[in-house]
Image (spheres, rainbow, N blue to C red):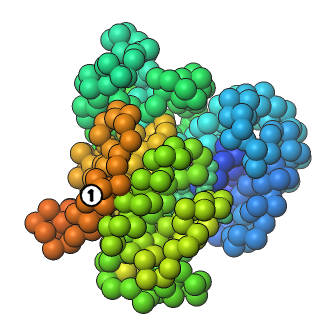
Amino acid sequence: MDPISGSAAPRRIHLAALPYPGRGHINALMNLCKLLSLRNPNILISFIVTDEWLTFLAADPKPQNIRFATFPNVIPSELRRANDFTGFLRSIHTHMEAPVETLLHRLDPPPTAILADAFVTWAVQLGKRLSVPVASLWPMSATVFSILYHFDLLKENGHFPADLSERGEEIVDYFPGVSKICLADLPSFFSGDGLQNVESAVNSARSVDKSQFFISTSVYELESSVIDALKAKFPFPVYTIGPSTPYFELECSAPNGGTDDYFRWLDSQAEGSVLYISQGSYLSVSSAQMDEIVAGVESSGVRFLWVVRGDDGRLKDVDRETGMVVEWCDQLKVLCHRSVGGFWTHGGWNSTLEGVFAGVPMLAWPIFWDQFPNSKKIAEDWKVGVRLKAVGGKDLVRRVEIAEFVKRFMNSESDEGRELRNRVSEFQEICRRAVAKGGSSDSNIDAFLTHISGEL
Ligand code: UDP
Ligand code: UDP
């Protein structure tokens, strides 16, 4: 498929962008759409969301050539999806396809390609019916993709199902390109919500088989052996375009991130002194553990900026000498602020890449799903951070231990602290090079655009 030759006027690329309805996923796809539209202002992108999601997104700034196209609220409300996550997933697989297909038929001009989150598994069939190519976007690490895609290997090796309390330390080394990993560090699909929904995740990874492009939000240099294995396997292009974070909207070298109150507070703190804490929102630690975390962090003497969803009474009386509590912040800009010297993270994939991109060492405390392999990557493979919780540990981590750990982690003067900071700077450089002119992600975005034009 050659790119359009210069003689005839090229048809306009019109991508139908189809996200899985969840914030992390929507943001990753929107960031890619913004990147594509910056690169080729002539492109048209229809970003497909429910009427409800439009109300959440309408105020976000976006380029003119990205427009929203909506379908009715046929899935449970975003505000209630955590109450019945399995039911939510089922409705995505069964209720969304028909209204989205109707919508795509009505788009004018008709879409020339579909750019779909791989978790919308039916997108590949839809593309086939519409005779347009489908690019599958994988919004987690390539490592997690490989594990899910090759899930049968776990069964064949007697590793699934397994009781992690007895077998968590057993090592797995047969996923193509994935470094050695113990069972407890795999995504949490051995019990609970994870076990209930693993089949759906495996199907999402396998749906990629029928797509025409695989797009990963990772950075090639960060997961090169897994990506090489995927390139060798798939007959279609595999493009890494990460980090999937809006770095192109950022002046990272600027000391001040913005005008909000928390940026003013950060401005008044010493360089590298603040621990930024964001534990994710979908699932959280137990109430007893949260008591220990709050007491431990407060008694460490380290100043913090803490994102707390809802009204956690434990932190309501924090004074500005101790730290600052916010319900939401502009995370990437916060991480890039010169006062921030550490990032306590649940290890979500976007947060992991943002921490690396900003060059901030991470203290990972994973709670659910891919946060376990991401945290292992942070602490053991990349060595750009540490893990507080022992692998598979079920016991409460006490406040005294947390306070000591936080103090040590934030100490940039010790040999250990210096080594960690040097290491994360090296990884930051890798990310910067990937998105700079001619870097791996930069070139892949161009290659994808050229390729998709050739499909017209
Ligand atoms: N977010 C936001 N405003 C808020 C709260 C959250 O824009 O008041 C966004 C934020 O930008 C981030 C996302 O919500 O992208 C994270 O939310 P969550 O952890 O719930 O994402 P999920 O796990 O559902 O993908
Ligand atoms: N985030 C943010 N402000 C907040 C909390 C989170 O902007 O106060 C963003 C964060 O930058 C990241 C996203 O929310 O891009 C969370 O995605 P991640 O993959 O880390 O977590 P998950 O969606 O898996 O919970």
Q: At x 37% / y 60%, what residue is drawn? A: 296
Q: What residue type is labelled 1?
A: Phe
Location of the N terminus by quadrant is: top right
Q: Nearer the viewer, residue 147 or 320?
A: 320
Q: Is residue 372 above or below residue 24?
A: above
Q: In this view, does 324 lie above or below 125?
A: below
Q: Could you tell me if residue 30 is visible in this image?
A: no
Label 1 lies in ligand 2 vicinity (Cβ under 8 Å): no
Residue 347 lies, in percent from the top left, at 43, 50
Number of numbered discs visible in the structure rendering: 1
Residue 252 lies, in percent from the top left, at 42, 78
Q: At x 45% / y 51%, what residue is drawn? A: 346
Mark 1 Cα-neighbour bin, 10 Å: few <14, some 14–19, many ≥20? some
| Outermost left residue | 415
Residue 139 lies, in percent from the top left, at 53, 46
Residue marked by disc 1:
405
Q: In this view, does 188 lie above or below 104?
A: above
Residue 291 lies, in percent from the top left, at 47, 53
Q: Could you tell me if residue 386 is visible in this image?
A: yes
Q: Toward which corner of the image does residue 178 lie, by quadrant?
A: top left
Q: Toward which corner of the image does residue 343 lie, by quadrant?
A: bottom left
Q: What element carries label 1?
A: helix
Q: Nearer the viewer, residue 411 or 208?
A: 411
Q: Is residue 245 left or right of residue 360?
A: right
Q: At x 32% / y 83%, what residue is drawn? A: 271
Q: Nearer the viewer, residue 48 or 76?
A: 76
Looking at the image, in which quadrant does ligand 1 appear? bottom right
Q: At x 65% / y 31%, what residue is drawn? A: 121
Q: Which of 3 and 316 is in front in this view?
A: 316
Q: Toward which corner of the image does residue 344 lie, by quadrant?
A: bottom left
